[in-house]
Amino acid sequence: MKKRRIVPFKIAIAFCFLAISFASIHWSAKSNELKNGYWRASILRPDGQQIVFNFQSKDSAGKKIIYVINGKEHLLVDSIETRTDSVFIEMPFFESSFKAKVNKEGNLEGIWVKKYGERVQTLPFKAAYNKKERFEVSAPPVANISGRWVTEFKTDNNADTIVAEFKQEGTHLSGTFLDPTGDYRYLDGIVSGDSLKLSTFDGAHAFLFTAKIDDNKNISGGKFYSGARSIQDWNAVKNDQATVADGFGETKIKPGSGKLNFSFPNSNDGTSVSINDQKYQGKVVVIQILGSWCPNCMDETKFLSDYYNKNHDRGVEVIGLAYERTTDFKESQKALQPFKKRFNVQYPILITGVTVSDSLRAQKTLPQLASINAFPTTIFVDKKGKIRKIDSGFSGPATGAHYAEFKNKFNKIVNELLAEK
């Protein structure tokens, strides 16, 4: 019979302490991780206003991911790194990121970092775990404000009139603002008593709207907070017949300017691509004027990438022309990569080397145009190389019926150009 080995008492005690220590370390590390579930996040402005948004964290394929939630949009963020009690979240676009620590309560405290070319903006950030609501509701709504509203935004120097579209279900409010050059993407919030709150965050847009609901026909005392410091007054009047002018009149072609004639380096490898290359001869060519800093450009890139992959064989080409915040090719190339990767962009995106802030950007890159007034802008070129239409702006998926209308117009224009001999 084999003799059983007896472990001395002191050694056994030591093993117990060691096991408890390892369990404690493991538990501590786990308790400091980004927990799965819903969060209420806030970016804190210097004036005390908080730009609120929600996100959901979860595990997927062995890694941590989050979805930033703005109404119907769930924006996937899959670049997340955890080190002990610190969490680093890189937004997929717009050179935007979060650096935070997990505190004793399991909540996040840190900073939001946003790059604007060479300028870097930093704002305090916090997120509360297991908070699914966006804003607190303290009273039943005084009115239902669903519908279209003529909205005036005021600054010290001028006032802009655009159209708002709201959808209210009980205390929940969603919607967006539209003008001829685009939309404010997905806004989400509440109606509490006679007050409304709407917000959004996508890495570039960090918006908060507040206002007083006088009745179901008038909204007054509105404030629009954007980013770190921008603030505008606004008010609105109900008008279900309010319309938004299309963007086809925003950008003009210079009389007698001739065909487009450009050549810029490809953001893939720096090789030169020209509209005069043999590849584009006898084709309908869609020119996309964009920037990696532009949320509406993100929405259009998603649309165009899908359209190109489905219609390229019909004789349609797409070329993107990027106007970044820097003239440095490598920096611009780096900023554009997330767009191209996320939306599987197969058409070339060229780097113009001219910044978005350059007032002479049209003269330096596309002298056939009087100006470049909006991002994105879409240029339709026929089989003979002639500019036929220019659409400035983009009504994205957050605009519902307007997005459907945009797609119908886009398809109609391209189909008519393809049908020409």
Image: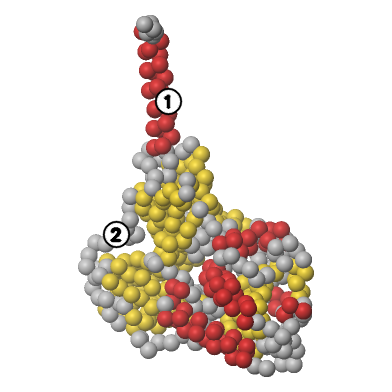
**Foreground: 221 or 247?**
247
One can see residue 321 in this view:
yes
Q: CA distance from mark 1 to mark 2?
A: 42 Å
Give the farthest residue toward the left. 140
Image height of 37 relative to 398, above or below: above
Expressed as whole percent of the image width and height from the top left, the position of residue 352 reads 72, 70
For disc 1, the marked residue is 22
Q: Quadrant of residue 73?
A: bottom left
For disc 2, the marked residue is 136
Residue drawn at (34%, 80%) of the image: 147
Image height of 409 relative to 228, above or below: below
- Three-letter residue code for mark 2: Glu
Expressed as whole percent of the image width and height from the top left, the position of residue 115 reads 59, 57
Residue drawn at (38%, 23%) of the image: 20
Expressed as whole percent of the image width and height from the top left, the position of residue 197 reads 35, 66
Q: Within 10 angstroms of label 1, few (less than 14), some, or many (20 or more) residues?
A: few
